[in-house]
Image (cartoon, rainbow, N blue to C red):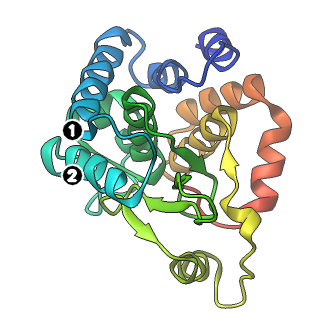
Amino acid sequence: VAQDLEEALNSPGGELAPAVLAIGRIEYPALDPRPYIDALDEMGIKAAERLGARPITSSDSIQTLNEYLYDEEGFCGNRDAYDDPRNSYLNEVVDRRTGIPISLAVIYLEIARRSGTSVSGVNFPGHFLLRAPQGVAGDDDLIIDPFHGGALLSEFDCRQLLRSHLGDEAAFDPSLLAPATRHDIVVRMLVNLKRLYVRMRSFPQARFVSTLLLAADPSAIVRLARRNGCELY
């Protein structure tokens, strides 16, 4: 698994699915990624059809993408069983149509990329977000909450979200909304899984995840721990 994950992280292009599906082999050793990549490809084609020939990203195009993913395809945040490890495995999220912020963000990013829509991840403390640059010069980027149906967040909303996770004294900084790399996303998913398995006292899985973290980037663990004094998700 570690070798497959490393190869996926170092592959050219920005595709996330192979790396995230490699993580799935923690719980599903015989997992075949091809059907899930095919499903993402199909959803990307359908999303592109809904979007049409739109030359720029805008709130309207994000709304169209939201309607496709959340209304038509039925993806939603798992509020009832938030800490279920299945919410972190892409194969389960595709099958069950539910997940946590970062796993739903992976779905969103993969469908957006396939449909020609410019969206990137945001390693926001406590609650993973997305951002999309608007095509009109001078407009601020759109900040998207993948857990709550693709809701668009203002800076005030982001400040409130930060306080809800870090407390009222938390200081907001625009750098918290910087785009996340593929590597950032995968490491954060692994950190989430490690915390969940330790909490569940599922120590064999926790050790396996730790091995993958060390293989991916040992220093990333320290950086994330310093930046996020809270649960990640």
Q: Viewed as shown, does residue 90 lie left or right of 16?
A: left
Q: Is residue 76 visible?
A: no
Residue 99 in the image: state x and y as whole percent: 34, 47
Q: Is residue 15 above or below residue 81?
A: above
Q: State which mark lies toward you, 2 or 1.
A: 1
Residue 81 in the image: state x and y as whole percent: 30, 57
| Residue appearing at x 65%, y 12% in the figure | 11
Q: Viewed as shown, does residue 56 lie left or right of 167?
A: left
Element on which disc 2 rests: helix
| Residue furthest to the left | 72
Q: Would you call the spot at circle 2 few (<14 residues within 10 Å), some (14-19), or many (20 or more)?
A: some
The answer to whether the residue labelled 2 contacts the one labelled 1, judged by CB atoms less than 8 Å apart, is yes
| Residue appearing at x 26%, y 50% in the figure | 64
- Residue to which mark 2 is pinned: 67
Q: Quadrant of the N terminus?
A: top right
Foreground residue, 96 or 155? Answer: 155
| Residue appearing at x 66%, y 37% in the figure | 187
Instruction: Specify which label sits upstream in the sequence, 2 or 1.
Output: 1
- Residue to which mark 1 is pinned: 50
Q: Is residue 103 above or below residue 15?
A: below
Residue 30 in the image: state x and y as whole percent: 37, 9
Q: Amino acid at mark 1?
A: Arg
| Residue appearing at x 77%, y 61% in the figure | 227
Q: Is residue 205 visible?
A: yes
Q: Amino acid at mark 2?
A: Glu
Disc 2/disc 1 C-alpha distance (Å)? 9 Å
Residue 156 in the image: state x and y as whole percent: 55, 84
Q: Would you call the spot at circle 1 few (<14 residues within 10 Å), some (14-19), or many (20 or more)?
A: some
Element on which disc 1 rests: helix
| Residue furthest to the bottom | 168
